[in-house]
Structure formats: C-alpha cells, structure tokens
Image (cartoon, rainbow, N blue to C red):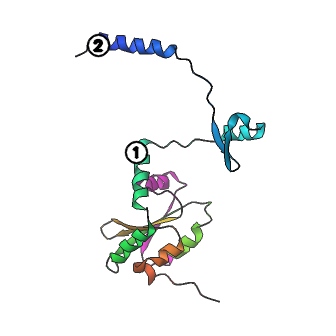
Amino acid sequence: MRTVAEIKADIDKVRAEMQDVHGTTTEVYARIVGYYRSVRNWNRGKREEYNHRKLFVPGTESVQQHLASACDCVSQQVVRDTVAATPEGSVARYELFVRDTCPNCPPVKDCCTALPLSGAQINVDSAEGLERAAELGILSAPTVVFFDHSGNEIARAHSVKEIRSMTTLRHAVAEPALF
C-alpha cells in the first residue's frame, strides 16, 4: 500500500510533466451552409456567427435518460402494437409536452382536448416543465405520453396522425370532415 507522501510525490511529478506539454494548432471543422469546412477558412461574418454558437453539453445522467428514452421509442409501430394489445379503456391519462414557439403543437393540443381522458399540458419552456420532460426523456415537442391506471407509460405520440392511429384511442378522436 502506498503512503500519502508517495502519492503526493506522484502528483507533483505529473504536474511538472503537464507544464512541459506543448501542443500543435488544431484544425476545427464545422458545418457551414450544408457542408463541413475548416473554420480557419471561413469569412469574417461566418466566423463571428460561429463564435456565437452555444455547445449543448448534457449531464451524464441526462444522456443516459435520453438514450433509454430513445431505445423505448425506436419504432412507433412497436408503440402502436403495445397500445393495440392493451385492453380497451386501459389508457387512463396523458401528459402533453409543448413549447410556446412550436408550430406543430396547436393541432396536437386540440386533438388531446377532444380525448375523453384526463390530461395535463406541460410547457417545456418553464423550469418545472423542462424538469418533468427530462424525467420522462422527452426529446421533442409536441409529445403526448399516455399512462395506464397504474401510472405506467403505455405509448407516445408526436402528431395528430399518430394519436388517431392508436386503436384504443381511435373511437375517441373524430376524423376530420371531408369537403
């Protein structure tokens, strides 16, 4: 077993080695107008735009939640089959995740209000809404998460078409009128 003095000596040795590290210039490539190009060759305006970009770096547990969520939602057909296999009326409630600036959210909101289910509309632009979305691994808006009576997630939908295609909900959602 090593002593504290030996560990401190190793740390000091590594610190001294780190001060003597000399690197080379790194070539950075980024996407610009549809293709990747060296940032060094960009014009002044594009370089300024690049400097204003923000890098999204999620926490480790967020990445694991998102990956788990992505695995759960690999195929909408699997979700539809799951809902079709559940007994009629087993969907108890829903949670609808929306954003203020989302152009696709209003039709899904209208569709969900027509459902004979209790539900909650959660705005992910708020801190509480974003926290709830992270808990469930919601990656886009609009997303409707359907739950059974036990509180277990049954299915997810992202559009009116997907909601209407769920067999247990088909009777509850009126088809659009044809002119």
Other-residue count near label 2 (Cα within 10 Å), few / some / many at <14 / 14–19 / ≥20: few
Q: Position of residue 108 (x, y in %)?
A: 54, 71
Instruction: Name the residue nearer the viewer: 126 or 80.
Output: 80
Is any part of residue 136 visible from this angle?
Answer: no
**x, y percent for residue 96:** 48, 66
- Give whichever of 110, 27 is nearer the camera: 27
Q: Secondary structure at mark 1?
A: helix
Mark 1 and mark 2 in contact? Answer it, CB < 8 Å.
no
Q: Is residue 156 above or below residue 175?
A: above
Left or right of 156 on screen, residue 126: right
Q: Which mark is residue 61?
A: 1
The residue type indicated by label 1 comes to Glu
- Percent of width and height locating residue 23: 57, 21
179 relative to 108, above or below: below
Q: Which residues are magenta?
A: 113-141
The residue at which mark 2 appears reads as 4
Which percent across, then down, holds residue 152? Answer: 33, 65
Answer left or right for 103 relative to 42: left
